[in-house]
Amino acid sequence: MARLTPAAFTQQPWRIHEIAGDFAVEDVWAFRAPGAGSDDFQAMVNAIRAAGGINNQPALGRLLFAVRWKLGALLGWDDPAEGVGSRVMSLRDRLPEDLRDAPRGWDDDAMPLKAVYELHDESARELANRTVHTVMHLGWVRGDADDHELWMTVLVKANGRFGRLYMALIAPFRHLLIYPALTRRWEQAWRDRVKSGPAPTTWSRRTGKAG
């Protein structure tokens, strides 16, 4: 597991920089994929989906997600009027023509993060609510040992003072619980990819896990 600096992300020649320059780089994490080559980004993404994606967490992680969705429902944070296409424009509206014609990536009604684009070495998904407009970017990078590794970057545009406070309050949970658990599962998914297969899974907001 490795947490990287925002500069590490900004120095990569990814297309996301063209459309998300007004978003702050919140977190950058690297996931090891021993033996991975330059063309294995899609294999890694498929392995992650087969293993349950970002919401396939241990019990404590599932509890945190469940509490978050419950609070969102009670306080109206996740009302459709606060989401992408309502409170904020989708990043798809910013795409240059060649990216607009590129594959969008796998999507599902149960997945909170919606696909913006997916290329051979990067993809982007977005989510908006009353607190933030956020992007999860996945990028494929050559590591120190000539193997490639997956970088996950969380980009955020906070919705005012409340959004900034929200991000500050959840930072310890992300850094100490969510990301370390995610790292173990995603790196294991790569090691198990032959057994797991590439079949995608759905993502349940209600249960906080894949199904």
Image (tube, rainbow, N blue to C red):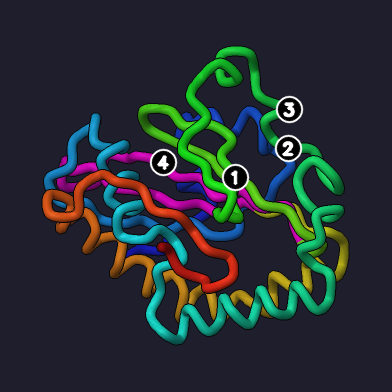
Q: Is residue 153 magenta?
A: yes
> Residue 208 at what x, y percent from top left?
52, 71
How far across and how far down the image is residue 127, in percent? 66, 52
Mark drawn on residue 93? 3
CA distance for labels 2 and 4: 20 Å
The residue that disc 1 covers is 114
First in residue order: circle 4 vs circle 1: 1
Tell me how far mark 2 sits from mark 3, CA to CA.
6 Å
Corner quadrant of residue 95:
top right
Q: Are marks 2 and 3 in contact (CB under 8 Å)?
A: yes
What element does badge 1 sit on? strand
Task: Give the vertical position of 184 relative to 51 (above or below).
Answer: below
Q: Is residue 29 visible?
A: yes
Q: Nearer the viewer, mark 3 or mark 4?
A: 3
On the image, numbered disc 2 is attached to which residue?
90
- Which segment did they paint magenta? 132-155
